[in-house]
Amino acid sequence: ETGVTQSPTHLIKTRGQQVTLRCSSQSGHNTVSWYQQALGQGPQFIFQYYREEENGRGNFPPRFSGLQFPNYSSELNVNALELDDSALYLCASSSPPGLAEYFGPGTRLTVL
Amino acid sequence: GIQVEQSPPDLILQEGANSTLRCNFSDSVNNLQWFHQNPWGQLINLFYIPSGTKQNGRLSATTVATERYSLLYISSSQTTDSGVYFCAERDDKIIFGKGTRLHILP
Protein backbone atom coordinates (compact mmCIF):
# COMPACT_ATOMS: atom_id res chain seq x y z
CA GLU A 1 0.00 0.00 0.00
CA THR A 2 1.46 3.35 -1.09
CA GLY A 3 1.18 6.23 1.38
CA VAL A 4 0.48 9.88 0.69
CA THR A 5 3.30 11.63 -1.15
CA GLN A 6 3.91 15.35 -1.75
CA SER A 7 6.24 17.34 -3.96
CA PRO A 8 8.37 19.32 -3.73
CA THR A 9 9.62 18.97 -0.15
CA HIS A 10 10.88 22.54 0.05
CA LEU A 11 10.24 25.62 -2.05
CA ILE A 12 11.38 29.24 -1.95
CA LYS A 13 9.39 31.90 -3.81
CA THR A 14 9.23 35.68 -3.81
CA ARG A 15 6.22 37.83 -3.01
CA GLY A 16 3.77 38.09 -5.93
CA GLN A 17 4.81 34.82 -7.57
CA GLN A 18 2.60 31.80 -8.10
CA VAL A 19 3.22 28.26 -6.78
CA THR A 20 1.83 24.78 -7.45
CA LEU A 21 2.12 22.01 -4.88
CA ARG A 22 1.33 18.37 -5.67
CA CYS A 23 -0.08 15.45 -3.73
CA SER A 24 -0.65 11.79 -4.53
CA SER A 25 -3.29 10.17 -2.34
CA GLN A 26 -2.93 6.85 -0.56
CA SER A 27 -3.88 3.87 -2.70
CA GLY A 28 -7.66 3.39 -2.68
CA HIS A 29 -8.46 6.86 -1.31
CA ASN A 30 -10.73 9.18 -3.34
CA THR A 31 -10.68 12.25 -1.08
CA VAL A 32 -7.85 14.75 -0.68
CA SER A 33 -7.69 17.62 1.81
CA TRP A 34 -5.15 20.43 1.97
CA TYR A 35 -3.97 22.21 5.13
CA GLN A 36 -1.73 25.16 5.93
CA GLN A 37 0.33 24.94 9.11
CA ALA A 38 2.09 28.09 10.27
CA LEU A 39 4.99 27.74 12.70
CA GLY A 40 3.81 26.78 16.18
CA GLN A 41 0.17 26.40 15.13
CA GLY A 42 -2.17 23.53 14.33
CA PRO A 43 -3.01 22.81 10.69
CA GLN A 44 -5.72 25.01 9.16
CA PHE A 45 -8.13 23.45 6.66
CA ILE A 46 -7.86 25.00 3.17
CA PHE A 47 -10.22 22.80 1.11
CA GLN A 48 -11.14 19.24 0.27
CA TYR A 49 -11.67 17.46 -3.05
CA TYR A 50 -13.86 14.40 -3.45
CA ARG A 51 -14.10 12.66 -6.82
CA GLU A 52 -12.66 15.71 -8.62
CA GLU A 53 -15.11 18.22 -7.09
CA GLU A 54 -14.47 20.72 -4.27
CA ASN A 55 -16.20 19.35 -1.18
CA GLY A 56 -15.72 22.05 1.44
CA ARG A 57 -13.51 25.07 1.93
CA GLY A 58 -11.98 26.84 4.90
CA ASN A 59 -11.41 30.56 5.41
CA PHE A 60 -8.86 31.09 2.66
CA PRO A 61 -9.06 33.68 -0.16
CA PRO A 62 -9.78 32.71 -3.79
CA ARG A 63 -6.09 32.98 -4.70
CA PHE A 64 -5.84 29.53 -3.06
CA SER A 65 -7.27 27.10 -5.60
CA GLY A 66 -7.04 23.40 -6.28
CA LEU A 67 -7.65 20.52 -8.61
CA GLN A 68 -8.18 16.80 -8.26
CA PHE A 69 -7.42 14.47 -11.15
CA PRO A 70 -9.13 11.20 -12.21
CA ASN A 71 -6.41 9.20 -10.42
CA TYR A 72 -7.32 11.21 -7.25
CA SER A 73 -3.99 13.05 -7.11
CA SER A 74 -4.33 16.75 -6.40
CA GLU A 75 -2.72 20.17 -6.84
CA LEU A 76 -2.81 23.25 -4.64
CA ASN A 77 -2.20 26.53 -6.47
CA VAL A 78 -1.50 29.80 -4.71
CA ASN A 79 -1.40 33.04 -6.73
CA ALA A 80 0.05 36.41 -5.76
CA LEU A 81 2.09 34.97 -2.91
CA GLU A 82 2.30 36.98 0.31
CA LEU A 83 4.88 36.75 3.09
CA ASP A 84 2.23 35.21 5.41
CA ASP A 85 1.82 32.29 3.01
CA SER A 86 5.12 30.92 4.33
CA ALA A 87 4.11 27.67 6.05
CA LEU A 88 4.11 23.90 5.90
CA TYR A 89 1.44 22.72 3.45
CA LEU A 90 0.02 19.32 4.24
CA CYS A 91 -2.07 17.04 2.10
CA ALA A 92 -4.22 14.25 3.54
CA SER A 93 -6.26 11.51 1.93
CA SER A 94 -9.21 9.46 3.10
CA SER A 95 -12.00 7.32 1.73
CA PRO A 96 -14.74 8.36 1.89
CA PRO A 97 -14.79 11.96 3.16
CA GLY A 98 -15.22 12.25 6.93
CA LEU A 99 -13.29 9.16 7.91
CA ALA A 100 -9.73 8.83 9.15
CA GLU A 101 -7.25 10.96 7.22
CA TYR A 102 -3.66 10.03 6.43
CA PHE A 103 -1.13 12.82 5.90
CA GLY A 104 1.76 13.30 3.54
CA PRO A 105 5.16 14.61 4.67
CA GLY A 106 4.33 18.18 3.65
CA THR A 107 5.83 20.91 1.48
CA ARG A 108 7.61 23.71 3.30
CA LEU A 109 7.04 26.98 1.42
CA THR A 110 9.08 30.07 2.16
CA VAL A 111 8.00 33.39 0.63
CA LEU A 112 10.66 36.11 0.61
CA GLY B 1 -18.03 26.20 14.45
CA ILE B 2 -16.70 23.79 17.01
CA GLN B 3 -13.87 24.92 19.31
CA VAL B 4 -11.08 22.50 20.25
CA GLU B 5 -8.92 23.05 23.33
CA GLN B 6 -5.93 20.93 24.21
CA SER B 7 -4.11 20.69 27.52
CA PRO B 8 -1.47 20.98 28.68
CA PRO B 9 0.17 23.12 25.98
CA ASP B 10 3.63 21.85 26.91
CA LEU B 11 4.87 18.80 28.82
CA ILE B 12 8.40 17.76 29.74
CA LEU B 13 8.86 14.26 31.14
CA GLN B 14 11.63 11.84 31.93
CA GLU B 15 11.89 8.70 29.83
CA GLY B 16 9.73 5.96 31.34
CA ALA B 17 7.06 8.29 32.74
CA ASN B 18 3.37 8.11 31.90
CA SER B 19 1.31 11.03 30.59
CA THR B 20 -2.28 12.02 29.86
CA LEU B 21 -3.18 14.56 27.19
CA ARG B 22 -6.65 16.06 27.07
CA CYS B 23 -8.85 17.46 24.33
CA ASN B 24 -12.06 19.40 25.12
CA PHE B 25 -14.71 20.28 22.56
CA SER B 26 -17.37 22.99 22.57
CA ASP B 27 -19.90 20.72 20.86
CA SER B 28 -20.59 17.02 20.39
CA VAL B 29 -17.97 15.01 18.50
CA ASN B 30 -18.50 12.46 15.74
CA ASN B 31 -15.19 12.06 13.89
CA LEU B 32 -12.39 12.58 16.38
CA GLN B 33 -8.77 11.76 15.55
CA TRP B 34 -5.48 11.96 17.42
CA PHE B 35 -2.24 12.70 15.57
CA HIS B 36 1.44 12.84 16.42
CA GLN B 37 3.62 15.31 14.53
CA ASN B 38 7.26 14.34 14.68
CA PRO B 39 10.09 16.91 14.72
CA TRP B 40 10.33 16.66 10.90
CA GLY B 41 6.69 17.73 10.44
CA GLN B 42 5.16 14.38 9.51
CA LEU B 43 1.65 13.95 10.95
CA ILE B 44 1.00 10.37 11.98
CA ASN B 45 -2.56 9.14 12.47
CA LEU B 46 -2.69 7.58 15.95
CA PHE B 47 -6.37 6.92 16.52
CA TYR B 48 -9.71 7.47 14.84
CA ILE B 49 -11.90 7.39 17.93
CA PRO B 50 -15.37 9.00 17.77
CA SER B 51 -16.28 7.16 20.99
CA GLY B 52 -15.06 4.48 23.37
CA THR B 53 -11.52 3.32 24.03
CA LYS B 54 -8.79 2.03 21.75
CA GLN B 55 -5.28 0.81 22.48
CA ASN B 56 -2.21 0.47 20.31
CA GLY B 57 0.87 -0.68 22.19
CA ARG B 58 1.89 1.92 24.76
CA LEU B 59 -0.74 4.37 23.53
CA SER B 60 -4.43 4.36 24.27
CA ALA B 61 -7.25 6.84 23.75
CA THR B 62 -10.68 7.33 25.25
CA THR B 63 -13.45 9.57 23.91
CA VAL B 64 -16.53 10.41 25.94
CA ALA B 65 -18.62 12.06 23.24
CA THR B 66 -21.52 12.98 25.54
CA GLU B 67 -19.14 14.90 27.81
CA ARG B 68 -17.22 16.42 24.88
CA TYR B 69 -13.69 15.30 25.71
CA SER B 70 -11.04 12.85 24.67
CA LEU B 71 -7.90 11.63 26.44
CA LEU B 72 -4.67 10.24 25.03
CA TYR B 73 -2.55 8.10 27.37
CA ILE B 74 1.12 7.43 26.76
CA SER B 75 2.74 4.87 29.04
CA SER B 76 6.46 4.21 29.58
CA SER B 77 7.44 7.23 27.46
CA GLN B 78 10.38 6.97 25.05
CA THR B 79 12.40 9.78 23.48
CA THR B 80 10.81 8.94 20.13
CA ASP B 81 7.44 9.97 21.60
CA SER B 82 8.63 13.61 21.54
CA GLY B 83 6.78 15.96 19.22
CA VAL B 84 3.39 17.64 19.08
CA TYR B 85 0.15 15.78 19.68
CA PHE B 86 -3.00 17.11 18.00
CA CYS B 87 -6.62 16.17 18.29
CA ALA B 88 -8.99 17.09 15.47
CA GLU B 89 -12.71 16.94 14.83
CA ARG B 90 -14.59 17.14 11.60
CA ASP B 91 -17.46 19.63 11.80
CA ASP B 92 -18.25 21.01 8.34
CA LYS B 93 -14.46 21.12 8.05
CA ILE B 94 -11.68 19.60 10.12
CA ILE B 95 -10.73 21.63 13.17
CA PHE B 96 -7.39 20.99 14.87
CA GLY B 97 -6.49 21.99 18.39
CA LYS B 98 -3.30 23.97 19.01
CA GLY B 99 -1.54 20.81 20.16
CA THR B 100 0.40 19.58 23.18
CA ARG B 101 4.17 19.79 22.75
CA LEU B 102 5.73 16.77 24.48
CA HIS B 103 9.45 16.54 25.20
CA ILE B 104 10.80 13.28 26.63
CA LEU B 105 14.20 13.57 28.29
CA PRO B 106 16.64 10.62 28.11
Image (tube, coloured by chain):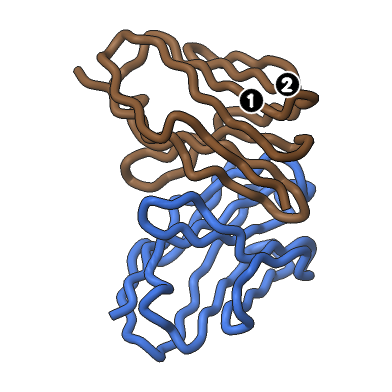
Q: Which mark is residue B4?
A: none
* Mark 2, residue position: B64
Q: Is residue A86 visible?
A: yes
Say which element carries label 2. strand
* Mark 1, residue position: B70
Residue in the picture at 78% in, 35% down:
B28
- Amino acid tagged 2: Val
Task: Say which quarter of the image contains residue B67.
Answer: top right
Q: Is residue A39 left or right of residue A74?
A: left
User: Residue A6, image x and y in percent?
Assistant: 48, 59
Q: Earlier in the sequence, mark 2 or mark 1?
A: 2
Disc 2 crowd, CA 10 A, few/some/many (<14, 14-19, 20+): some
Q: Is residue B50 left or right of residue A93?
A: right
Vertical comparison of B31 with B46: above or below: below
Q: Are marks 2 and 1 in contact (CB under 8 Å)?
A: yes
Residue in the picture at 32% in, 85% down:
A14
Vertical comparison of A86 with A80: above or below: above
Say which element carries label 1. strand
Disc 1 crowd, CA 10 A, few/some/many (<14, 14-19, 20+): many
Residue in the picture at 74% in, 68% down:
A70
Q: Is residue A90 left or right of residue B63?
A: left
Q: Chain of mark 2?
A: B
Q: Which chain is blue?
A: A
Q: Nearer the viewer, residue B2 or B52?
A: B2
Q: Which chain is brown?
A: B
Find the distance from the CA under tag 2 to the CA under tag 1: 6 Å
- Amino acid tagged 1: Ser
User: Residue A64, image x and y in percent?
Assistant: 58, 78
